[in-house]
Amino acid sequence: MPRNTKHPAVKSARVRRTAPKPEPAVGVIGGSGLYEMDGLKDVREVRLRTPFGAPSDAFITGRLDGVPMVFLPRHGRGHRILPSELNFRANIWGMKMLGVEWLIGVSAVGSMKEEIRPGHIVLPDQFIDRTKNRADTFFGGGVAVHVGLADPICPALHGVLIGASQEAGARVHGHGVYLCMEGPQFSTRAESRLHRSWGVDVIGMTNAQEARLAREAEICYASVALATDYDCWHEVEEAVTAGAILDVLHRNVEMARRIVRHAAPHRPVPRRCACPDALAAAIITDRRQIPAAARKRLGLLLDKYLRADKIQ
């Protein structure tokens, strides 16, 4: 399927908040190089509105080997949106609207350790967020919510991805710390050496916000990080360039697709992790004091906690 054209079999649709509850689905947010999911059947292109504005692009829904799936190109088709310009809230909200319960974020990263070679797959389970001024919560405006984020990756989905990566034949590192930088420029050498001194494993520009918002949306989230380069700390390898990244990505993207295909049938059903109830003890505001406008805006997340029988 060409990157910038609509698949001939795709049907267009618009989703409204009053639509029937969708079937639980696996979501995939594709980063650099991963602009579509091969093998989807019953494909539809869904454009929707969110309280936070427009998502990066239309969502592509369908079935992958019978499993309901929703795909979104993170940077838009044609890769036209910078990391700092991404509407993370609209992207995650849209996934929630479409019934996504398990979300896999696929992205390119720089390796900060010798043993993580370009072409390897890393499945991070921790983040350090060094971004600035990005909107990374749905709440505020009269609603104070503080979710737990000690373990930002869903352990159940993470375990599925470890098995799927091994089954797909990837050179996989099953754990790691992902440092999320602002970008769009790559690191200076001084920054790269500083980050290495912190013991981080990979560096990227997108996944921390997705993990935060997925937790608030009570979606299980895990990352598949495609190592493309050694940032600029390595004394022998050349400093990272966009061209070098794309060369490695062409090889990595097919592996990412195989991992998703192996993982989807093994999604943890039913969800016994803490993700589906992340808001249960996190809403601090007195239910009676939540503004009507906020209740309406955030109903997709709050309705199950703000029903009349829940309010004391």
Image (spheres, rainbow, N blue to C red):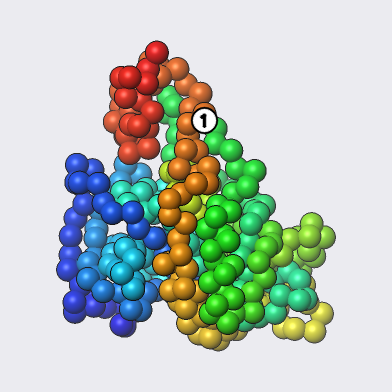
Residue 245 x/y as whole percent:
58, 80
Q: Could you tell whether 275 is left or right of 190 in the image?
A: left
Instruction: State the residue at coordinates (63%, 61%).
Output: 124
Looking at the rendered structure, the kind of residue marked 1 is Ala
Quadrant occupied by the C terminus: top left
Q: Could you tell whether 299 is left or right of 159 in the image?
A: left
Viewer-nearest residue: 236 or 108: 108
Viewer-nearest residue: 76 or 151: 151
Residue 201 x/y as whole percent:
71, 65
SS class of the residue under badge 1?
Answer: loop
Residue 36 x/y as whole percent:
36, 74
Is residue 308 in sight in this rendering?
yes
Residue 295, relative to residue 266: is it above or below?
A: above
Instruction: State the residue at coordinates (42%, 67%).
Output: 264
Quadrant occupied by the N terminus: bottom left
Instruction: State the residue at coordinates (47%, 56%).
Output: 268
Residue 149 x/y as whole percent:
60, 42
Instruction: State the residue at coordinates (78%, 60%).
Output: 199
